């Protein structure tokens, strides 16, 4: 079980303990994921204090960071890696969105069922997220963000690192997918970890969903925005295959992470069995 019972950090999970090939597992306590950190308080939260976080990577947009600034533990370093900057800028330029991704606009989206139906009904919400996931692979800002993330993880002096976005499900989910795939996790393990955030995220937004449905909103729209679905992840993985042929090539050629960095990542983040070459 990788969920951590933090009282001040939403959707906090340790990738440690997840199974890899050849009897190996992910080493615990070194790479963690979460939702926004505006309430993080190690002094009042022994679970967070025990992690000894040294680096935080924030995948959120400038508007998200301004609305809910991270609370960074004393001594930790904050790395801003805005994964959707290009996607949001393009949408704003075309008058199709404001300066936050859909997952960060839940309150506004779910406050008006008629508007939600007009803009997101009929499968449009699912299509929007599939496009977003493809952009997490192909856009310049996403490549820069995930390069920065991996450079932190592959640094020779790297310590415990926490990466996050707003809900800790999409941008963060793709980051976890990259790491687990590089470490040799099976496709089933990768998808299972990706989907495992759904109960926590849906529980956090249950009152909002209930209010939306009570006003006549389509629950499928709410679930498409609030949760994650296999088809979203498959859209990103298909983009990797189409552009690069494999996750290793995507990381090497698309993100510019050298093979020795990946080897260092595998050595540091795995335990038991033999480390894949």
Image (cartoon, rainbow, N blue to C red):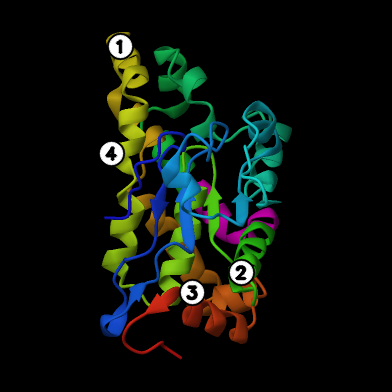
Q: Earlier in the sequence, mark 3 or mark 4?
A: 4
Which secondary structure lies at badge 1? loop
Could you tell me which secondary element the residue under label 2 belongs to?
Answer: loop
- Estimate the x, y position of residue 105 in percent, counting from the top left: 53, 26
Q: Residue at x 40, y 70 (%)?
A: 27
Residue occupying the far top of the picture: 215
Q: What range is drawn magenta here?
A: 131-143
Which residue appears at 42% of the width and 35% of the height?
A: 125
Residue 202 higher or lower than 157, as above or below = above
- 18 sits left or right of 57 in the view: left
Q: Nearer the viewer, mark 3 or mark 4?
A: 4
Question: What secondary structure prevails in the magenta region?
Answer: helix
Q: Is residue 80 above or below residue 26?
A: above
Quarter the N terminus occupies:
bottom left
Q: Is residue 4 visible?
A: yes
Does residue 100 appear to the left or right of 226 in the view shown? right
Between marks 1 and 2 in the image, the one whose residue lies nearer the viewer = 2
- Disc 2 from disc 3: Cα separation: 22 Å
Query: Dot 3 corresponds to which residue?
Result: 247
Residue denoted by label 1: 216
Nearer to us: label 4 or label 1? 4
């Amino acid at each position: 079980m990788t969920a951590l019972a933090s009282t001040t950090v939403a959707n906090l999970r340790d990738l440690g303990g997840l199974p890899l090939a050849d009897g190996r597992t992910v080493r615990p306590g070194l790479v963690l994921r979460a939702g926004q950190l505006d309430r993080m308080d190690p002094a009042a939260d022994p679970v967070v204090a025990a992690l000894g976080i040294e680096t935080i990577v924030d995948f959120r947009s400038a508007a998200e960071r301004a609305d809910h600034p991270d609370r960074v533990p004393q001594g930790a370093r904050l790395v801003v890696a805005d994964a959707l900057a290009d996607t949001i800028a393009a949408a704003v330029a075309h008058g199709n969105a404001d300066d936050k991704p859909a997952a960060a606009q839940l309150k506004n989206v779910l406050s008006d069922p008629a508007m939600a139906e007009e803009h997101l009904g009929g499968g449009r919400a699912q299509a929007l997220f599939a496009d977003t996931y493809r952009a997490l692979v192909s856009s310049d800002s996403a490549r820069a963000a995930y390069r920065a993330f991996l450079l932190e993880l592959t640094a020779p002096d790297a310590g415990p690192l926490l990466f996050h976005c707003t809900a800790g499900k999409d941008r963060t989910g793709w980051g976890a997918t990259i790491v687990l795939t590089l470490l040799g996790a099976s496709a089933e393990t990768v998808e299972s970890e990706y989907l495992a955030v759904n109960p926590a995220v849906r529980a956090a937004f249950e009152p909002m969903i209930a209010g939306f449905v009570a006003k006549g909103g389509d629950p499928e729209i709410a679930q498409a925005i609030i949760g994650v679905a296999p088809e979203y992840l498959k859209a990103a993985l298909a983009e990797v295959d189409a552009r690069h042929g494999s996750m290793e090539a995507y990381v090497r050629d698309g993100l510019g992470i050298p093979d020795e960095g990946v080897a260092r990542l595998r050595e540091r983040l795995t335990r038991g069995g033999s480390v894949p070459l």
